[in-house]
């Protein structure tokens, strides 16, 4: 199997969808890529080097997604804390 048969990771499209808060589109892009990868892997690739490169690119994208998830979780926690503080302030008055 040639390197051309290895599906390209749609990293730029996923990042663009995330930037525009189009979560379903980002998930659909990754799901489509997953299906294409599984089909390509079923053909038993001969040269593992292009697959290793794709894996490295995938790992970098996943690290970025995890960092964004953690940032979102932190922001949500801050919002919840602010809400609790505001409620407590209102009840104390």
Image (spheres, helix red, strand yellow):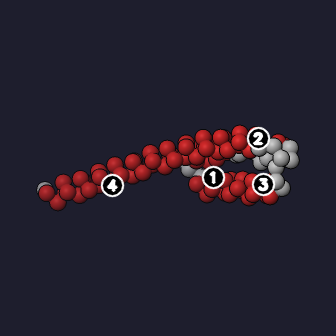
Mark 2 and mark 1: Cα distance apart in space: 24 Å
- Image quadrant of residue 51? top right
Q: Position of residue 15 (x, y in %)?
A: 61, 43
Checking the image for residue 41, the label placed there is 3
| SS at circle 1 | helix
Q: Earlier in the sequence, mark 4 or mark 1?
A: 1
Q: Dot 4, crowdedness within 10 Å: few (<14), some or many (≥20)?
A: few
Query: Would you name the residue on which mark 4 appears?
Result: 80
State left or right for residue 55 relative to residue 77. Answer: right
- Image quadrant of residue 49? top right
Q: Position of residue 9 (x, y in %)?
A: 71, 45
Give the label, 3 or 4, closer to the camera. Answer: 3
Query: Would you name the residue on which mark 1 appears?
Result: 26
Q: Position of residue 28 (x, y in %)?
A: 67, 57
Picture mark count:
4
Callout 2 touching callout 3 (CB < 8 Å): no
Query: Would you name the residue on which mark 2 appears?
Result: 50
Give the label, 1 or 3, closer to the camera. Answer: 3
Q: Earlier in the sequence, mark 2 or mark 3?
A: 3
């Amino acid at each position: 199997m040639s390197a051309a048969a290895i599906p390209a990771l749609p990293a730029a499209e996923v990042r663009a969808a995330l930037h525009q808060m189009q979560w379903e589109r980002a998930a659909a892009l990754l799901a489509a890529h997953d299906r294409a990868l599984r089909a390509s892997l079923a053909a038993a690739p001969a040269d593992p080097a292009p697959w290793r490169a794709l894996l490295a690119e995938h790992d970098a994208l996943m690290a970025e997604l995890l960092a964004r998830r953690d940032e979102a979780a932190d922001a949500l926690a801050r919002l919840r804390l602010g809400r609790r503080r505001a409620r407590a302030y209102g009840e104390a008055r």
